[in-house]
Image (cartoon, rainbow, N blue to C red):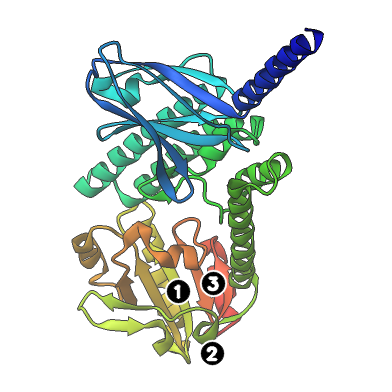
Amino acid sequence: MKKSIEKIVLLILLIGGLFACEKGDSFRIEGNISAAEGDTLYLEHRGLGGALLLDSVILKSDGAFAFRQPAPANPEFYQLRLGNQTAAFAVDSVETLRVEAEASDLYRSFTVKDSPSNDQLKKVDALVMQTARRITELENQHKAGTMDDITFLTQLDTTLIDYKAEISPIILGNPSSAAAYYAVFQKINDYLIFDPFNRKDYPMFGAVATSWNRYYPDTERSKHLYEFTMNALKTRRQQEQQTKLLESAPVETGSGLPDIVLQEVNGEKVALSSLKGKAVLLDFVVYDADFSPKHNIGLNSLYRQYKSRGFEIYQISFDSDEHFWKTSADNLPWITVRDPQSVNARLLSMYNVREIPTAFILNREGDIVARIEDYAQLSDELKKVL
């Protein structure tokens, strides 16, 4: 009898232990989706390769559901899908998440009860949508011609700075969290808001990558984030080396940078390399800006003074309004071309142009020998190459 009791107790402990192990290795999400009777609710994993279906249930009149899945090794992302609507959520570890939502607007009504991590995800989403709407407004005003190029660039930059100021505390406050990982990879118009190739933005990726590598080593997301961050660092350092060359050291246009070939007002293409043998001012401007008239008057004075000594100006307009550029440039005596990509032109990043106007001086061999941001220094710099 005693042995039988011992066996029963041992069996109960074993069963209890197995149940505890099963419960300890899984997470549960449960809740209600109102007004969704007969609809199929899907649970999907949002992995690096895309969404993967994990489970599904046909909702009854009360909209109740419950899913259980293996607990992830690191903070992980999942979504509930109802038709073409989705609502994302994060799972930090072994836990039970209680959610509520309305079928008519799954995303906006979706709430996770008592989950600070998911509250932060919702905050990130709200800020991204707010910023995206503001950028769309700016783009519409710019396209409509009610906002000039310089104002557009300035306000776009301000909008992104404001967003980053709001999001940065979420990332740096707990870089090992799901919200931090989620935030650094947010995009607007398919572009990462935090640019891993930008010196100011890179520390966000570095902080999250370092923290995840420490707390969740050898997991798929940690490895991917680490490789992504290291590749960005390598590329950024290469860009910084090029920037140093552009700012302080001679660079051969033919080998150091691609040639520039753009159209003049008359439609004829002119290559920067065709001016080899002359001292050239490579001038980046926008004609539809307050500084432009005074700027060109000053250049005209220098041009008349030094043209006979082999001086030429290759002036690139980044105006979005082609007609305005043609009208403004038609009577200028030097070479005036326009980049049709306007303020989105690759030339601006290639030459590390942070503000307009900015210029470079090329010697007679076609090497960049000086960067000009203060045009008061232009005459002195020109004398060195003439």
**Mark 1, residues whose alpha carbon is within 10 Å: few (<14), some, or many (≥20)?**
many
Pick the front one: 4 or 111: 4
Residue 286 seen by the camera: no
Q: Name the residue beneath numbered marker 2.
A: 365
> How busy is the neighbourhood of tag 2: few (under 14 within 10 Å), some, or many (20 plus)?
some
Separation of residues labelled 2 and 1 (CA atoms): 14 Å
> Circle 3: is it few (<14), some (14-19), or many (20+) Cα within 10 Å?
few
- Which percent across, then down, holds residue 324? 22, 60
Residue 32 pos. (x, y %): 36, 15
The residue at 32%/74% (across/down) is: 336
State left or right for residue 14 relative to residue 115.
right
- Amino acid, disc 2: Glu
Q: How far is disc 3 from disc 1 in space, using C-alphas?
A: 14 Å
Q: Secondary structure at mark 1?
A: strand
- Name the residue at 58% across, 71% down: 246
Mark 3 belongs to which amino acid? Answer: Ser
Q: Secondary structure at mark 3?
A: helix
Q: Earlier in the sequence, mark 3 or mark 1?
A: 1
Badge 2 or badge 1: first in the primary sequence? 1
Q: 351 or 232, which is in the foreground?
A: 232
The residue that label 3 is drawn on is: 379
Q: Quadrant of residue 267?
A: bottom left
Quick one: quadrant of the N terminus?
Answer: top right
Q: Nearer the viewer, residue 58 or 282?
A: 58
Judging by the rendered image, the residue that carries numbered circle 1 is 282
Q: Residue at x 32, y 60 (%)?
A: 342
- Comparing 274 with 303, the one in front is 274
